[in-house]
Image (tube, coloured by chain):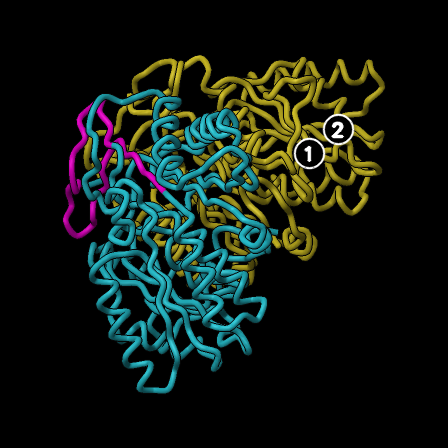
Chain colours: A cyan, B yellow
Amino acid sequence: MKKFINMPENVVTEMLEGLLAAHPDLLKSVENNSKNLVRKDAPVQNKVAIISGGGSGHLPLFLGYIGKGMLDGVAVGEIFASPSSKQILDVTKAVDSGKGVLYLYGNYGGDIMNFDMAAEMAEMEGIQTATVIGTDDVASMPKGQESERRGVAGLFYLYKIAAAKAEEGASLEEVVEIAQFTNNNVRTMGVALSPCTLPEVGKPTFTIEEGKMELGMGIHGEPGYYKGDIQTADEVAETIVSKIYDDLVLEEGSKVSVLVNGLGATPLEELYIIFRKVKNVLEEKKVSLHRAYVGEYATSLEMAGLSVSVLKLNDELERLLDQPFVTPFHVQP
Amino acid sequence: MKKFINMPENVVTEMLEGLLAAHPDLLKSVENNSKNLVRKDAPVQNKVAIISGGGSGHLPLFLGYIGKGMLDGVAVGEIFASPSSKQILDVTKAVDSGKGVLYLYGNYGGDIMNFDMAAEMAEMEGIQTATVIGTDDVASMPKGQESERRGVAGLFYLYKIAAAKAEEGASLEEVVEIAQFTNNNVRTMGVALSPCTLPEVGKPTFTIEEGKMELGMGIHGEPGYYKGDIQTADEVAETIVSKIYDDLVLEEGSKVSVLVNGLGATPLEELYIIFRKVKNVLEEKKVSLHRAYVGEYATSLEMAGLSVSVLKLNDELERLLDQPFVTPFHVQP
């Protein structure tokens, strides 16, 4: 195992200490638990608060999206493990300003269980919550079973749109509605070249042989639908866009935003080579591109691979997407 | 070789097509050569222009630093290869507003030759240029031979400080002076866990055995000064800070900025674990931290590893460091 770590069991707490120390102007912990982080200025008055959370090991997901124009708070667990319901409740109490709290996270069993328990406890304390679950991974379940799909990098768009709406003073009901609408209009597909290694396990979570790749793989190494020879960047981009195009029901004249996300070890250079072809394929199909994001947005430790997310825009989504945000990792002026 | 590419000889041009397509609001090419990029609003009137350049394969270095509050233009070559003097001249002409142009780049023979030739050609065309060369890699040459050291991630600070000065309307002489002063006050040291593979070569540029690491390695795989067992993150951070502390002549009461830079494959989580210890060691030595940067700032394709840069601040450097900038990769509000 080749990692810059100390004791494997301390990876998450030490990472969080570093994160807090590096961004004291943006973040603060709740109840001295660095696994519970909120905006420095939380609770923000007269605003619906938005919380996310999940396992560690996916930076910038989840903690990296705390900030103005993005999330109010986040609870994380150990590497690839859910935060506890107590954590989520603590974060809920720290961010609620009385306008209610949206729980916005990916479709994983452990997270659902703990967020649901936290919602019940919050209700008992008089805090109104609502839940929208991200299900953007088009490869994880066939069409018709969209609600059973995993949530992956497309969560970025859910955060961005819902948060922009909340910043405008929308009600919890309105923020839920736009978050759900965004989820219905975003699709992601990933491809992996090599695995990652969990620090406490010490060996790779799966194997992909030399010269092979796996299409449709999830961000914890969940199996994809195709394992075979590495294709060219153009072939990979074409395959992914084609799959998303059909599933999302794009057509001539559609307008989209694209996110090409690196899973950890893949160089930025390769992400741009993929983006180039994604844009070309969309243009051939007369789909226009509004705003592109290329970089690391939801990783899997040092996994080599990438994902492409496409958000189908309407006027409101476009307007909300264009609003600024400031987080420790990404800033949109 | 596991990469998302098409023909290896097209990696750089296709990457650049993608970069331009993703950031049309920030970048434009010069003379239809996508290896020559400048600010969308170039030439900026009444401002000293700053140009950098070098080989591709280091994103965000170099192209990623074009933008307001950063560089005016960049010329890049193929992977790890210098741009031509003709390219640099073309960029020079595209960014010069009559106040002169600073060439600011790392200490590599090929780059020096081509920038110097471009400077001569620019002079013949009536454009005033000056040169400051980054030499921040403390491990590459011993103390006393600072000017022979390589330039690595510390270039970020040279860009940032010099550009902020230029934005204030400073003269070429003043911008040169602050850039040189910054270079004298920044040190970087890197450590690698695994190599990268040049697309046109197809196999790793060097090897580091399982369980081993190499301290002091350069961003093209130039040999370091120690190859041995992987140390803990805390040991690595202590070694690097100790080396930089002595070389930079820090003392109780010094104030610094720190950049923990990932070389490509190393997860953000590990960078924060390293940052945590860097900060702790500096605090033990009564050195205070003003502003931290953690992420990918100067990479080597998919090399696993990181570097730590420390900039010793005075009041002027601190003020200039705090000015905003907007580039395709990093934004400081």
Locate residue B84 relative to residue B140 in the image: left or right.
right
Q: Secondary structure at mark 2?
A: helix
Residue nearer the viewer, B200 or A102: A102
Name the chain letter of the residue that bears numbered label 2.
B
Quarter holding the N terminus of chain B is: top left
Q: Is residue B165 above or below residue B281?
A: above
Q: Tell me residue A99's x, y (percent).
A: 48, 78
Q: Tell me residue A86's x, y (percent).
A: 27, 76
Q: Is residue B112 above or below residue B308?
A: above
Q: Which mark is residue B39?
A: 1
Residue nearer the viewer, B122 or A93: A93
Q: Is residue A241 above or below residue A59?
A: above
* Residue A189 on the magenta span: yes
Locate residue A215 relative to residue B39 in the image: left or right.
left
Q: Residue furthest bottom?
A: A125
Q: Residues within 10 Å of mark 2 (few under 14, many from 20)?
A: many
Q: Nearer the viewer, mark 1 or mark 2?
A: 1
Q: Earlier in the sequence, mark 1 or mark 2?
A: 1
Amino acid type for the residue under numbered disc 1: Arg
Name the chain letter of the residue that bears numbered label 1.
B
Provide the major secondary structure of the magenta segment.
loop
Q: Which residue is mark 2?
A: B95
Q: Secondary structure at mark 1?
A: strand
Q: In this picture, which residue range is highlighted in magenta?
A: A188-214
* Residue A320 on the magenta span: no
Locate residue B87 relative to residue A260 in the image: left or right.
right
The answer to which image quadrant residue B119 occupies is top right
Q: Tell me residue B18's x, y (percent).
A: 52, 28
Amino acid type for the residue under numbered disc 2: Val
Residue at image position (78%, 47%) is: B168
